[in-house]
């Protein structure tokens, strides 16, 4: 088996979760030692844990592709699935875990430099490792309750990380708002779990797919659908529930902004997709999700236009990108889901890089106001180059990986008979270039007396951004490896569903 | 098997009370109590549904309730810690004063 036996060979965990959980628990002790030795050991520890967990994802991929029907089942104390919590790992879970591991490794390298002058680095590193662990758990869990436990682990770590710089009032206010909205959503999620249990008698995904799926539409199924949308929708910032995001993402430290915008909201979207496709037929949720997609991308992009705060603008742009990803979910086809999951991976790289590069600028100049940053780009050429690549990718310019996933998404929405979504998506992409180009114009304009003096960011920060830029451009010209894995992953929700049920039950 | 209707009505009422508390109350601690009421409504529904399997009482939802109590307790603890920090900066627990960030 994958997991290591902890309690008399009974408690089995997938390797990435085991590494991050144990690593997170060990971090405070490493912090104690490093304080004694006056070394920065916890940073090295965090990079080591992230790299090891990425290796764990690779071994998991190996094992999943070797099993007969590509579903790896891990359960504890001999309890078989329909009656107990378990982990069910298929290609989709491995694919999402790969995105999480890659971004968290890059972010942990970046935050060595970024958090250099902050106190309480040990707490920061511990919380980041636990947040990553929660995300791994969400993408691998095989029933709703295991998902809920890891959901709250991710949530708890992210509330504290958003309000980490507690000497300012901004992070505290944003963190409290985030906590109230997310905890309310957690209560809705628990209620939907209770309703699902009442209808089906189980919370296991495979058992739900064979009992609840295809049930006739009653008030109870509509209630379950509504509570699920509220429960998952707050974390993934679907529009009527997005109000915490433009406050929380800018106020967090920049590496955390990159993690939150790059992968945490997408993990919420993954959970929504998984549960919706397990519990309902695609025809049931096609129209509501399409309406949410339309509203989400339009509102996100329109509000981003009138922001002066650079990080706040990027946060609104994240809302717009969530709207594009919802298009793929609403199509109900494997091709649309391929677009969604490809865009999740690409967005994690592009938005992560955008937040990291903007973080370099904030780190060097101390301001986030676009109007005050005129001419700063000429003093930070490498950072400006990475911002350029990230913004071109987010806008969907051909030659970057963002173009490919957006093309697939819009193409799929035409195929599913929702051509209004394709039209709105293309118009929104054009609209989004307006505010991306505004930032680039400000950064590259001529120096004046008011220009803030700045120098290039430290080598580690620039290096991480450059690695991501190279990845985006390479995947833009040569997308076949990642598209191959993503199409394997997206098959597991529709065509692979009977296979999934058969493998578990 | 207990009759279920009464429990469903109670759950709906508790959920309504929690949402009303979240919308109407201005005190940060009362907001957190509202969230706690929401969690407890969902937990009550779980416990009520656990009696509905014929011939037995299903232990699975009851174990879920145990874990969910721990989880919402930790969330409320973090919320109270943040409320203390809010008080340090704003010298008040009034949610209407937390308007420095744009909404």
Image: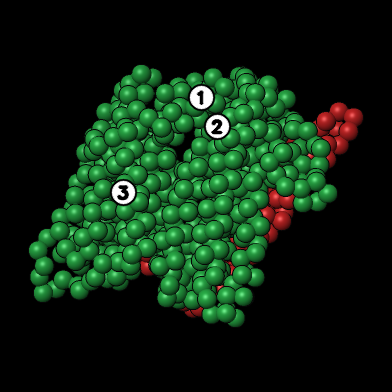
> Where residue A246 sits: x, y (%)?
38, 55
Q: Are marks 2 and 1 in contact (CB under 8 Å)?
A: yes
Q: Name the residue carrying label 3.
A: A469
Q: Considering only order in the chain, which callout, 3 or 2, is on the residue closer to the N terminus? A: 2
What scheme was used to colour the molecule?
A: by chain
**Residue A91: image tag:** 2
Colour in which the image shows chain A: green
Q: Considering only order in the chain, which callout, 3 or 1, is on the residue closer to the N terminus? A: 3
Kindly tell me whether residue A227 is visible in this rendering. Answer: no
Which chain's residue wears label 2? A
In-image side of A245 versus A176 (left or right) = left
In front: label 2 or label 1 = 2
Between marks 2 and 3, how big is the CA–CA gap?
26 Å
Q: Considering only order in the chain, which callout, 1 or 2, is on the residue closer to the N terminus? A: 2
**Mark 2: secondary structure:** helix
> Where residue A421 sits: x, y (%)?
32, 28
**Mark 1: secondary structure:** helix
Q: In what quadrant of the picture does the N terminus of chain A appear? A: top right
> Where residue A32 sits: x, y (%)?
62, 75
Q: In what quadrant of the picture does the C terminus of chain A appear? A: top right
Q: Name the residue carrying label 1.
A: A491
Task: Give the chain letter for red.
Answer: B
Graded by Cα atoms within 10 Å as few (under 14), some (14 to 19) or many (20 or more), the crowding at tag 1 reads some
């Amino acid at each position: 088996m994958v997991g290591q036996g902890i309690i008399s060979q009974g408690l089995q965990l997938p390797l990435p979760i085991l590494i991050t959980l144990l690593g997170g628990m060990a971090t405070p002790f490493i912090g104690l030692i490093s304080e004694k030795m006056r070394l920065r050991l916890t940073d090295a520890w965090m990079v080591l844990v992230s790299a090891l967990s990425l290796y764990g994802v690779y071994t998991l991929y190996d094992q999943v592709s070797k099993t007969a029907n590509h579903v790896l089942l891990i359960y504890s104390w001999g309890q078989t699935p329909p009656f107990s919590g378990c982990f069910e790992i298929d290609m989709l879970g491995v694919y999402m875990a790969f995105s999480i591991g890659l971004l968290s490794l890059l972010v942990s390298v970046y935050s060595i430099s970024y958090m250099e002058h902050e106190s309480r680095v040990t707490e920061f590193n511990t919380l980041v490792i636990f947040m990553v662990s929660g995300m791994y758990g969400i993408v691998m869990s095989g029933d709703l309750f295991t998902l809920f436990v890891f959901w709250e682990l991710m949530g708890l770590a992210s509330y504290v990380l958003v309000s980490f710089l507690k000497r300012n009032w901004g992070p505290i206010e944003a963190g409290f708002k985030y906590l109230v909205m997310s905890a309310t959503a957690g209560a809705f999620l628990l209620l939907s779990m209770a309703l699902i249990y009442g209808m089906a008698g189980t919370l296991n995904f495979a058992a739900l797919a064979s009992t609840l799926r295809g049930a006739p539409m009653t008030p109870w199924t509509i209630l379950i659908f509504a509570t699920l949308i509220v429960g998952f929708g707050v974390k993934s910032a679907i529009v009527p529930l997005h109000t915490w995001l433009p406050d929380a993402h800018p106020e967090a430290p920049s590496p955390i902004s990159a993690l939150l915008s790059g992968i945490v909201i997408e993990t919420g979207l993954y959970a929504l997709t998984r549960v919706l496709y397990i519990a309902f037929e695609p025809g049931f949720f096609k129209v509501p999700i399409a309406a949410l997609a339309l509203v989400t991308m339009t509102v996100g992009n329109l509000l981003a236009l009138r922001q002066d705060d650079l990080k706040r603008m990027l946060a609104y742009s994240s809302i717009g990108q969530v709207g594009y990803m919802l298009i793929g979910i609403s199509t109900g086809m494997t091709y649309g889901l391929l677009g969604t999951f490809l865009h999740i991976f690409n967005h994690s790289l592009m938005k992560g890089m955008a937040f990291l590069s903007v973080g370099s600028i904030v780190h060097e100049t101390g301001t986030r106001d676009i109007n005050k940053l005129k001419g700063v780009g000429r003093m930070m050429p490498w950072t400006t180059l990475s911002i350029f690549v990230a913004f071109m990718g987010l806008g969907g310019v051909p030659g970057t990986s963002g173009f490919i996933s957006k093309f697939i998404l819009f193409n799929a929405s035409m195929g599913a008979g929702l051509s209004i979504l394709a039209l709105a998506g293309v118009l929104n992409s054009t609209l989004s270039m307006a505010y991306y180009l505004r930032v680039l114009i400000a950064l590259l304009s001529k120096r004046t007396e008011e220009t803030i003096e700045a120098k290039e960011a430290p080598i580690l920060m620039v290096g991480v951004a450059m690695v991501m830029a190279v990845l985006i451009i390479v995947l833009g010209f040569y997308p076949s490896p990642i598209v191959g894995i993503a199409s394997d992953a997206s098959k597991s929700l529709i065509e692979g569903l009977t296979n999934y049920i058969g493998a578990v039950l | 098997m207990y009759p279920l209707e009464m429990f469903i009505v109670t759950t709906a009422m508790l959920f309504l009370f929690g949402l009303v508390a979240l919308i109407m109350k201005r005190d940060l601690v009362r907001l957190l109590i509202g969230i706690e009421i929401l969690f407890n409504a969902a937990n009550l529904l779980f416990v009520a549904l656990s009696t509905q399997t014929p011939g037995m009482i299903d232990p699975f939802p009851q174990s879920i309730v145990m874990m969910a109590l721990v989880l919402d307790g930790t969330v409320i603890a973090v919320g109270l810690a943040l409320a203390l920090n809010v008080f340090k900066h704003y010298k008040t627990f009034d949610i209407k004063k937390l308007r420095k960030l744009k909404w």
